[in-house]
Image (cartoon, rainbow, N blue to C red):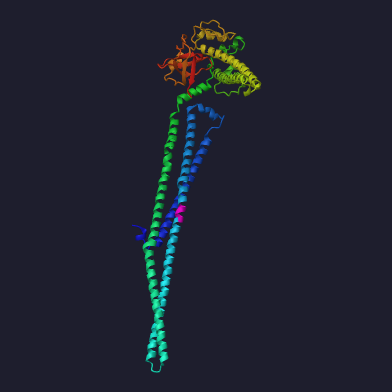
Amino acid sequence: MDWGTDLWDQYDIIDKHTQSGLELVEKYVKFVKERTEIEQNYAKQLRNLTKKYNPKRGCKEEQECRFSNHQSFLDILNEMNDYAGQRELIAENMMMNICIELTKYLQELKMERKTHLTEAKKSQQSLESTYKQLDSSKKRFEREWREADKAAQYAEKTDQDINATKADVEKAKQQANMRTHIAEECKNDYAAQLQKYNKEQSQFYFSDMPLIFNKLQDMDERRVRKLAQGYVLFSDTERHVMPIIGKCLEGVTKAGTNVNERNDSIALIEQYKSGFERPGDLDFEDYSQGINRASSDSSLGTLGTPKGPLELLSKNRSKPFWLFSKKSKPTVTEDFGHLPPEQRRKRLQQKLDDIGKELQKEVDQSEALEKMKDVYEKNPQMGDPASLSPQINQTAQNMERLRLELSKYESWVTEAGRRGDSMLRRDTLPEDALSYGSHSNNNEPYSPDGTHSEEGTPDPSQPIYAEFDDDFEEEEELVAPIGQCTAMYNFPGASEGTITMQEGEVLSVVEEDKGDGWTRVRRANGNEGYIPTSYVSISLSK
């Protein structure tokens, strides 16, 4: 079935149907454009939202990203930003593959439809023109035949008239013959025009118009097929990015599962642990005996604890330490003396590491300059060795300055380590030794047997870290390793709290060096202990 055969007489219907089909394509293109605008606005709003909640550089929120719940929120913001990018990709692909393609195809269909309709009109006009000629020849034939009939009747009447002369009769007969001849010519012309019209009419209805209608049918079917492809692309465009969107959503889920409340608590402790001891009991001041008001030193004062921001360590030690009291902002010093012992050791060690890295860069640069100078001396055409002297001198000055800073910070780290060790050893002192020390006039630390010992010199019989065994016994869950280390030397591990180590052995790092020269590690069998940091090569997980 085709339009040319079954709809040969429905030109107006075909005209309206094809026009309606083109309007549907335009409507669908407009629909997809509005959809792309929605996607673009949605993506823009998502990007603005993630930008709004992303912490700015250097702000307090960025510093808190070391906690897993804060980091997971940043991961969610990043995933949502990627999700917004996928929505933009959907809008872009819909615009390119549907809107632009269909709009271009629509223009081609309009031109094709116009061409077919123009051909139909031309065929119609040609047939109408032939029909007018036929009608004209028919009317002329009718008129001339009547005139011939009248002339024949007049000639017959003249011939029967007894009063008519012979010349009148001949004239009437000649006139009748002439009219009859003209009528015959008009009849032949009418017959020829009729034959021509019938032929063109047959050509019009059985060939020309069916061919045009079939072309319009083919055009309309191609339009429908192209539009159907646009419908499919509408869903395929989004389906193609669904795997990536799924990964974004999986990233959000992973961010939620990565939150570890225990590790966050440990991170907070590591960041803000002061290292101070809790205040001891205040001594009774008996004014009735006329004794001068004495200073009530806490247990912290007996061990030579460095000055910190706590009011407990201020000059006026008679005042009790209030946990929730407002503390004045301490003055920042180069040796971080304003910080609590634990934080001071960490900051000094961090500064020491930074200086070491900077010094290594200068050393590498110095070696490179020396090599370049040697090359210039051997090959003068490559450059002047003297031109490198300013850089070499500047690098040497930088190295000297960094070495001085390194030495200075190493001394501060050693000092902080000695003070931290004295505080750790306090837990091992007998109760009577602590009591005695609190009333003595000097603040020299005491060894476990109650005798004086030099500050910072540990008793060989004493464990390196006395409290670590208790920590191991009290921990119900093993701390997750933060990296691995490889032993470069053998270590006997004779002191309590340490662990033996063989050269080449790989151990898990549980706790970094806090500036005291010891790193806490764990074997595969679960045994934990401390080893010298300088004896191993450490690789921390990122």
Is 525 or 104 nearer to us in this picture?
104
Q: Is residue 75 above or below residue 450?
A: below
x then y, percent, for residue 240: 42, 40
Q: Is residue 283 visible?
A: no
Res. 173 image quadrant: bottom left
Q: Is residue 539 visible?
A: yes
- 158 left or right of 338? left
Quadrant where the N terminus lies?
bottom left
- Residue appearing at x 46%, y 24% in the figure: 263
**Callout count:** 0
Is 310 or 343 nearer to us in this picture?
343
Q: Which residues are magenta?
A: 106-111
Is 80 or 134 nearer to us in this picture?
134
Q: Is residue 274 above or below residue 224?
A: above
Q: Is residue 215 above or below residue 368?
A: below
x then y, percent, for residue 230: 42, 47
x then y, percent, for residue 462: 49, 8
Q: Is residue 466 magenta?
A: no
**Which residue is at the far left?**
1
- Residue appearing at x 37%, y 64% in the figure: 205
Q: Main secondary structure of the magenta part?
A: helix
Res. 301 image quadrant: top right
- Residue appearing at x 56%, y 31% in the figure: 57
x then y, percent, for residue 153: 38, 86
